[in-house]
Amino acid sequence: MSYANDMTMTTVSRTDAGLASQLRVSVMRLRRRLVAERDPGNDLSIGQMAVLGALHAKGELTVGELAAHERVQPPSMTRTVGCLVDGGYVERRPSDADRRQVIVAITDKGRGTVKADRARRDEWLAQQLAGLTAAERAVLREAAPILEKISSS
Amino acid sequence: MSYANDMTMTTVSRTDAGLASQLRVSVMRLRRRLVAERDPGNDLSIGQMAVLGALHAKGELTVGELAAHERVQPPSMTRTVGCLVDGGYVERRPSDADRRQVIVAITDKGRGTVKADRARRDEWLAQQLAGLTAAERAVLREAAPILEKISSS
DNA sequence: TATTGTTATACTCTATAACTATA
DNA sequence: TATAGTTATAGAGTATAACAATA
């Protein structure tokens, strides 16, 4: 990658502007495909799966925390959580520390659903990756943590 | 990248399964950030912007072509196009070849909106890219077309 | 009095079904 | 008769406003 070091500052900037465009389009398009490859045996909506995913990662969260995490208003989260409770994917209980708060916890069924859904998406993506060259896969292996770094900063 | 060639088939598969997971999470998260960085002076919905983007790229399309492109039913596209017409972003006219078809064409205002919206997203992304090392940017420059290839296959 | 969450209600987006115009 | 698009109507998801319980 030594050629990058030979560029002037102006050239690097211009190239990066193009990179931003290209990367945005690539990411948007790939995400669309990944969403389309959702588990058909899974009747939960995108929003419900997002909440379940957050709970799978963080264990337990209050309704307010979930609303903030998903950037949604509290009443919307109340509704979403209600659907998940009805389906047996999560359980709801009042907090001991502050009895106004409601703690939402994922159930075993919920964990299973998250894992199955992810496996389904990964299966499609892994097939696509298998169609690449080893060098291309190596590039993506390097790129993934960089994309992650960009998102969380 | 010669190490990949030394791996057994099983090892490669196992590694790629992990890569699929990692890549999926990275792409999903980055897309969420990019969507959040939409132009606040732009009151068009995500779906409307997607249609405008398609027209910006392809010039003119019929309602049916737009519906197929956005994977939406024709009545939904009729409605979306109607909103865009009301806002002056696109124009609608019957096809000369087949008078049942309705051709939708983007206006100058529509083109301006697409460019402003993309500039806004690219601005945020370019800032993030500027915080990377030259080597990391080089990796992303290689990765973008590979992500594109995966999506369209 | 302020905060957490819920209920009531309305709006947006998309879908299916029925219809009109053209091929 | 088949196709392109529209209109009518319904369902899912989310928002704001008003309210109940707790701090």
Image (tube, coloured by chain):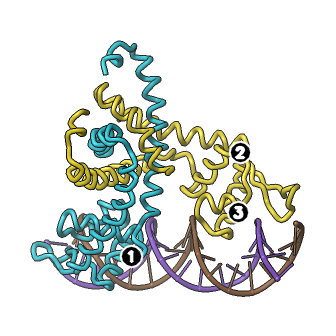
Chain colours: A yellow, B cyan, C purple, D brown
Whether tag 2 and tag 3 are in contact, CB under 8 A, the answer is no
SS for dot 2:
loop
Counting other residues with Cα less than 10 Å from the Cα at mark 3, is it few (<14), some (14-19), or many (20 or more)?
some
Image quadrant containing the N terminus of chain A? top left
Residue A82 seen by the camera: no
| Label ID, residue B122 | none
Q: Is residue B66 above or below residue A23?
A: below
Q: Residue flagged by tag 2: what amino acid is it?
A: Gly
Q: Is residue A24 above or below residue B142?
A: below
Q: CA distance from mark 3 to mark 1?
A: 28 Å
Which chain does the residue under circle 2 lie in? A
Q: Which residue is mark 1?
A: B42
Kindly indicate whether the residues beneath marks 2 and 3 are on one polypeptide chain. yes
Q: Which of the two discs, 2 and 3, labels the residue nearer the N terminus?
A: 2
In the image: residue A119, left or right of residue A86:
left
In the image: residue A119, left or right of residue C18:
right
Residue B113 image offset from top left, x and y in percent: 29, 74
- Residue pictured at 60% horizontal, 43% vertical: A114
Q: Which residue is mark 3?
A: A64
- Residue pictured at 27% horizontal, 69% vertical: B115
Q: CA distance from mark 2 to mark 3?
A: 15 Å
- Residue pictured at 32% horizontal, 76% vertical: B81
Residue B119 image offset from top left, x and y in percent: 31, 65
Q: Which residue is mark 2?
A: A59
Q: Quadrant of residue B67?
A: bottom left
SS for dot 3:
helix
Q: Nearer the viewer, residue A100 or B105?
A: A100
Residue A40 image offset from top left, x and y in percent: 51, 47
Q: Is residue C9 above or below residue C15?
A: below
